[in-house]
Image (tube, rainbow, N blue to C red):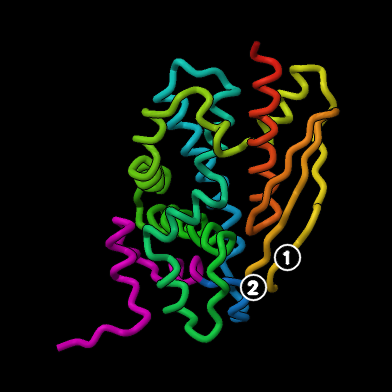
Amino acid sequence: MMTRRKDDLGDLEARLGHPFKDQALLREALTHTSAGTGRDNQRLEFLGDALLNFTVALLLHRERGDWQEGAMSKFRGVLVRTEALRDWALALGLDQALQAIHPRKAPPMGSKPLADALEAVLAAIYLDAQASAGNGAETVQALVEVRFLQAIRQAQPESWIHTDPKTHLQETAARLGLPAPGYALVDQTGPGHAPRFKVQVSVAAHTAQAEGPTRKRAEGEAARLLLDQLGTRTDR
């Protein structure tokens, strides 16, 4: 009876729905720069980022004939943001695969390494399918549809407001003839491995403060709070 190796990627291939002809491509996609092996996943991540944006744009154009360019562009940003790709990577088990490939040099499993690995895997699937006389674009498109089709069909034209409040605040300020939002770090507390950031956002005389585990999260929450204030003052 054959013993499965620790770094066997058969389970991941099953979740992806694509058995690789060239497993070296998949291993490259799962090789973070911290592994120091000379061939990491950055080139594949570059290609995968373009593939992902293209395939999501195709889906939005096909499914949302009722949306204009601005709504499609913003909702695409919601779907392909780092946190969303991290969640997809975790659902596929890419964190376990990264650790299996380089158990002693696996990167910290933050959002960025996982999102990069996800994009690199999409590129690896494309190249592997193309090299096997298949259609790489269709193969990636099918995988992207499984992940995003339902969300696209159920989305409302302003679904991005809750996931990108900073952009919405900037647009709201411009629409109201107010200056662009300004963000300032008020305080940083907690140990290095679990910091807390307090941020203040200001638009003219309007201000709001919020805390978060990252400065970006704190800024987003502060923007959301200020949007509530501006809505109260301008929707009357």
Q: Which residue is mark 2?
A: 193
Name the residue located 65 percent from the left edge and 36 percent from the top edge: 225
Vertically, is 154 above or below 94? above
Q: Considering only vertical position in the picture, is 220 above or below 23?
A: above
Q: At label 1, which amino acid type do we have?
A: Thr
What is the spatial separation of the Cα atoms under label 2 and label 1, in whole angstroms? 11 Å
Disc marking residue 138: none
Q: Which residue does the image show at 35% across and 57% down from the upper left? A: 132
Q: Quadrant of the C terminus?
A: top right
Q: Is residue 8 magenta?
A: yes
Residue 199 drawn at (x, y percent): 75, 49
Kindly report which numbered mark, 2 or 1, lies closer to the viewer in this rendering. Answer: 1
**Which of the two residues, 170 or 235, is positioned nearer the viewer here?**
235
* Residue at image location 55% in from the left, 35% down from the top: 162
For label 1, the residue is 189
Of 218 and 18, nearer the camera is: 218
* Residue span colored magenta: 1-30
Q: Position of residue 53 (x, y in %)?
A: 54, 41
Please check the rendered image and state whether residue 72 is part of the magenta-colored stretch, yes or no: no
**Residue 80 location (% of width, % of height):** 53, 44
Q: Nearer the viewer, residue 115 or 209?
A: 209
Residue at 81% from the left image edge and 36% from the top image edge: 202
What's the residue type where badge 2 is placed? His
Residue positioned most to the top = 236
Residue 135 visible (yes or no): no
Q: Is residue 226 left or right of residue 107?
A: right
